[in-house]
Image (spheres, helix red, strand yellow):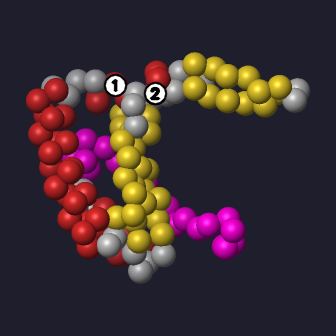
Amino acid sequence: MKFLCQIWFDTEKSKLVPQTEWDALTQECIVSDDHWRDSGHMLSALALYEPERAVTLRVRNGTVAATDGPFAEIKEHLGGFVVIEAKDIEEAKAIISTFPILKYASIEIRPAYSIKDGR
């Protein structure tokens, strides 16, 4: 079973973490990701740039409108995601609980499916 794991950061608190801590955390995350990728559990993992670099698209009255940055003021922002393969939610929780990023973020684990295959 596939799970999408969304990595959420407190927007203000994450700005207070010194760059040296982020750099050390990045190295820990690379080691962790390599381990889970080698085990066959990690299918994909990407970090996201800050919300200010986002563009939000909406269709209004048949026209696509683009808004720079986050659409609304946010207290938390999506900082990355991981897609894993696990037998069930318990195994997914066990895998994600080892991720070093949990020291600085929360991770939402959600079962995922292909729309082609249905639920």
Residue placed farthest to the top in the image?
68
User: Which element carries disc 1, helix, strand or loop?
Assistant: helix
Q: Which mark is residue 84?
A: none
Is residue 79 something one can see in this rendering? Answer: yes
Residue range of the region highlighted in magenta in the rendering: 101-119
Q: 49 and 91: which one is in front?
A: 49
User: Which residue lies under the disc numbered 2?
Assistant: 51
Residue that protrudes farthest toward the bottom in the picture:
87
Numbered circle sitting on residue 12: 1
- In depth, the one of 27 and 3 nearer the eye is 27
Magenta residue check for 106: yes
Which of these two is toward me, 96 or 84? 84
Residue 52 magenta-highlighted: no
53 shown above or below 44: above
Label 1 and label 2: CA atoms lie apart by 12 Å
Q: Amino acid at mark 1?
A: Glu
The amino acid marked with disc number 2 is Pro
* Marks 1 and 2 in Cβ contact (< 8 Å): no
Q: Position of residue 99 (x, y in %)?
A: 24, 56
